[in-house]
Image (cartoon, rainbow, N blue to C red):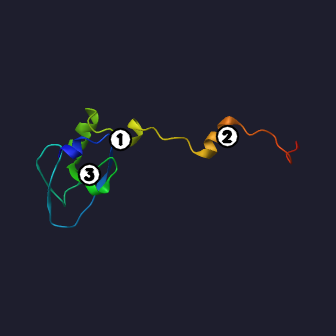
Amino acid sequence: MDDFRAARWYAVRPAGSTKPATYRCPLCGKRLPALSEHLLVLPDGDAARRRHAHTNCVMRARRAGRLPLRDEVEPRRRGWLSRLLRRGVPDGPGRSER
């Protein structure tokens, strides 16, 4: 469980399962039936370390700041096209005004 809490950021997505299993929520420690609506939480985006969690527990942890998402910790870098357009493209050979 410490490995789960030691992550710098988390990815969260809806979970859906038809298998008759019961998980333990890493946030509250209570049981979580697989057939109930819940979320998958991936520490540092690592699917091998994913945990099933109650939706309410995830929302509560997010509000308390204990479950930061990747964009909150590592803001996305602008794409190359966006950077190029922001910088402006100088007129080069072959470019003429119409």
In this view, the residue in front, 6 or 75, is 6
Q: Considering the numbered disc 2 on the image, is that residue within a helix, a strand or a loop?
A: helix
Return the mark for residue 85.
Answer: 2
Instruction: Please state, as top left, top right, bottom left or bottom right, where the C terminus lies in the image.
Output: top right
At label 1, which amino acid type do we have?
A: Leu
Q: Badge 3 local density, few (<14 within 10 Å), some, or many (20+)?
A: many
> Which callout, 1 or 3, points to the residue nearer the camera?
1
> Which callout, 3 or 2, points to the residue nearer the camera?
2
From what the image shows, is residue 52 above or below residue 98? below
Looking at the picture, how far across and down is residue 57, in whole percent? 20, 42
At label 3, which amino acid type do we have?
A: Leu
Q: CA distance from mark 2 to mark 1?
A: 28 Å
Q: CA distance from mark 1 to mark 3?
A: 14 Å
Q: Considering the numbered disc 3 on the image, is that residue within a helix, a strand or a loop?
A: strand
The answer to whether residue 23 is seen in the rendering is yes
- The residue singled out by tag 3 in the image is 39
At label 2, which amino acid type do we have?
A: Leu
Q: Considering the numbered disc 1 on the image, is that residue within a helix, a strand or a loop?
A: loop
Left or right? Give the position of 8 relative to 92: left
- The residue singled out by tag 1 in the image is 69
Q: Earlier along the polypeptide chain: callout 1 or callout 3? A: 3
Looking at the picture, how far across and down is residue 67, in whole percent? 28, 39
